[in-house]
């Protein structure tokens, strides 16, 4: 008896389709949209209530005046002399903006409109932060770096004013980004190949560094030190690449002093540049936190913890990240770490010996952000335990929350004390009034008045004030407390007893700015407004004129 086995029925085979990759065009669109989004968000955060979030600062009143003069006759002049203290590039770019868009009006009008130019440059910096971190790691970490830059309260406050550091940092970032593919591992004994020499990219990177030098020479340690180290050590950039970039930067800068000499400004160029070097080395302490009689840097750091606390955290993390990248990272990551070291070395010297000013920390915060965003994915990949990931998320959330609260406070409040005082003067003080501008910076905003004192020339006493026959006195409480104005706290107390307080406005930048009327200088009753007594004064070229 035979048995037959019947084969089981064959079931249809289901094959899982391979995962579909997005088409190349889709990837290209995303690659374009991400930096565009970074730019828009960065610019938008700074433009919101730009005119009222940050009061007019001394440097802005000087830089806008120089740029306005360049827009008029093409010369960089401040007072009776050509201006060579800083490089010319930022002033000529601002002069171009003034001419193209027809910017005019009062000094404050020009400052507020030129701030938009600096905000747009900041958007470019954010895109370069994204591009550098993305090149080293992945796009999402590039977005983290860009977000840290876009929201950091210290960075936002300086981008929203006419500080030269924003433009200088843009060129520095562009130079490091262009040279990033040139960073290679050393050739091993087995003959590991390296990418071919591309001196065109080395020249382009050096040209960007040269533009940074033409913007502000204090940026030089950020890229000159790393290039010199590469020339000595042969890595992470080849000696030839580093030498080509450094040479190109110097060649890019060289026409500037040559033109100054050929146009008769050789003496002033050398005088102002050597004066700047002496200030940077600390031989002359004319400004900054190392100047005798002013609050220390530590006291200012402590006072600003509520605003810039997370900026300090980023700086600390950036220093640690730079060390880790240099010891454990690839050639590209070591190239970025050398930028971090250059920034820390420059700031360490300035704090210990040189002229340290708050805006110089801009050079340190940006590379710290790049280093932190570049190091985070590497650490998570190597030590990717759950507690570490939770800690990383907690740190990001804490920084984001702190920065958001700070941004809301700054951009929904009003910091316009100095601008308000200028507006009151223009509406209530007759033209050609004698004014003692003892709030440093306001002297550049009152071109229609006879200025009796230069607030940078030294402290003014009550007897000097009486002898000047000044009709109005403008003071800043915060400048007086910090030793940055010609009005001491004792003089403010004297004015409170002997002068008439006509106007006062309080803000974060200048404290309480007061317009005082000295007795006997004017009739008891002045027209209260609102009709202005003088037309809105247009910005004038050069430094203010003081009474002899």
Image (spheres, helix red, strand yellow):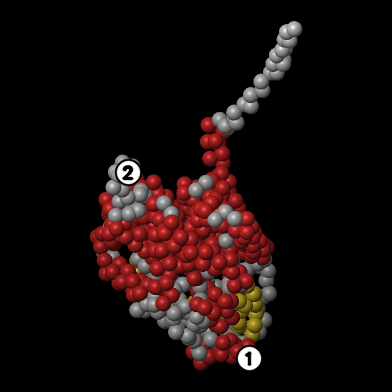
Residue 198 seen by the camera: no
Q: Whole-percent x and y of residue 486?
A: 50, 83
Q: Is residue 74 left or right of residue 35?
A: left
Q: Residue 28: where, in percent of width, then height?
A: 53, 36
Mark 1 falls on what kind of element?
helix
Q: Position of residue 116 (x, y in %)?
A: 54, 55
Q: Is residue 459 visible?
A: yes
Q: Residues under labels 2 and 1: Cα distance? A: 81 Å
Rendered residue at 58%/63% (across/down): 153
Placement of the C terminus among the 4 image quadrants:
bottom left
Give the vertical position of 269 relative to 141 (above or below).
Answer: below
User: What residue would you read off at disc 2?
Assistant: 192
Q: Between residue 428 and residue 217, name the one nearer to us.
A: 217
Q: Quadrant of residue 83?
A: bottom left
Up-down relation of residue 489 to residue 340 (above or below): below
Residue at point 39% right, 52% down?
A: 331
Given residues 526 and 122, the one toward you in this image is 122
Q: Residue at x 62, y 26 (%)?
A: 17
* Left or right of 508 in this view: 469: left
Mark 2 falls on what kind of element? loop
**Residue 520 quadrant:** bottom right
**Which mark is on residue 497?**
1
């Amino acid at each position: 008896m035979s048995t037959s086995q019947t084969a089981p029925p064959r079931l249809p085979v289901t094959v899982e389709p391979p995962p579909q990759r997005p088409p190349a065009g889709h990837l290209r669109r995303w690659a374009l949209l991400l930096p565009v989004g970074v730019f828009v968000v960065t610019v938008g955060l700074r433009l919101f209530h730009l005119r009222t979030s940050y009061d007019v600062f001394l440097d802005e009143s000087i830089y806008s005046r120089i740029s306005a003069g360049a827009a008029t006759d093409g010369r960089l002049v401040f007072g009776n002399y050509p201006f060579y203290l800083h490089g010319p590039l930022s002033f000529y770019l601002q002069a171009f903006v003034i001419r193209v868009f027809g910017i005019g009006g009062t000094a404050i009008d020009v400052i507020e409109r030129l701030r938009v130019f600096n905000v747009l440059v900041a958007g470019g910096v954010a895109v370069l932060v994204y591009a550098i971190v993305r090149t080293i790691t992945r796009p999402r970490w590039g977005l983290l770096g860009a977000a840290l830059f876009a929201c950091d309260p210290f960075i936002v406050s300086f981008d929203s004013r006419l500080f030269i550091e924003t433009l200088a940092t843009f060129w520095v970032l562009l130079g490091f980004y262009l040279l990033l593919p040139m960073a290679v591992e050393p050739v091993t004994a087995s003959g590991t190949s390296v990418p071919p020499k591309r001196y065109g990219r080395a020249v382009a990177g050096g040209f960007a560094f040269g533009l940074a030098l033409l913007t502000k020479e204090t940026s030089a340690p950020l890229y000159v030190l790393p290039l010199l180290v590469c020339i000595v050590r042969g890595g992470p950039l080849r000696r030839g690449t580093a030498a080509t970039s450094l040479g190109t930067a110097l060649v890019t800068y060289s026409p500037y002093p040559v033109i100054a000499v050929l146009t008769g400004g050789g003496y002033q160029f050398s005088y102002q540049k050597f004066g700047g070097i002496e200030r940077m080395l600390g031989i002359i302490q004319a400004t900054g936190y190392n100047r005798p009689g002013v609050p220390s840097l530590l006291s200012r750091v402590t006072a600003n913890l509520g605003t810039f606390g997370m900026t300090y955290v980023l700086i600390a993390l950036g220093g640690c990240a730079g060390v880790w990248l240099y010891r454990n990272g690839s050639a590209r990551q070591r190239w970025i770490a050398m930028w971090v070291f250059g920034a820390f070395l420059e700031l360490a010297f300035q704090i210990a010996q040189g002229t340290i000013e708050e805006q110089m920390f801009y050079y340190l915060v940006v590379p710290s952000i790049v280093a932190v965003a570049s190091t985070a994915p590497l650490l998570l990949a190597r030590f990717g335990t759950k507690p570490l990931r939770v800690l990383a998320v907690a740190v990001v959330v804490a920084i984001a929350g702190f920065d958001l609260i700070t941004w809301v406070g700054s951009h929904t409040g009003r910091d316009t004390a100095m601008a308000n005082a200028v507006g009151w003067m223009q509406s209530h003080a007759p033209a050609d009034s004698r004014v003692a501008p003892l709030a440093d910076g306001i002297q550049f905003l009152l071109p229609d008045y006879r200025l009796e004192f230069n607030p940078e020339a030294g402290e003014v006493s009550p007897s000097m004030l009486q002898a000047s026959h000044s009709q109005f006195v403008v003071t800043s409480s915060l400048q007086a407390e910090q030793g940055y104005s010609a009005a001491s706290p004792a003089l403010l107390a004297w004015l409170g007893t002997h002068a008439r307080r006509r106007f006062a406005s309080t803000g974060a930048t200048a404290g309480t700015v007061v317009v005082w009327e000295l007795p006997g200088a004017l009739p008891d009753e002045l027209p209260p407004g609102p009709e202005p007594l003088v037309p809105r004064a247009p910005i004038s070229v050069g430094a203010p004129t003081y009474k002899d």
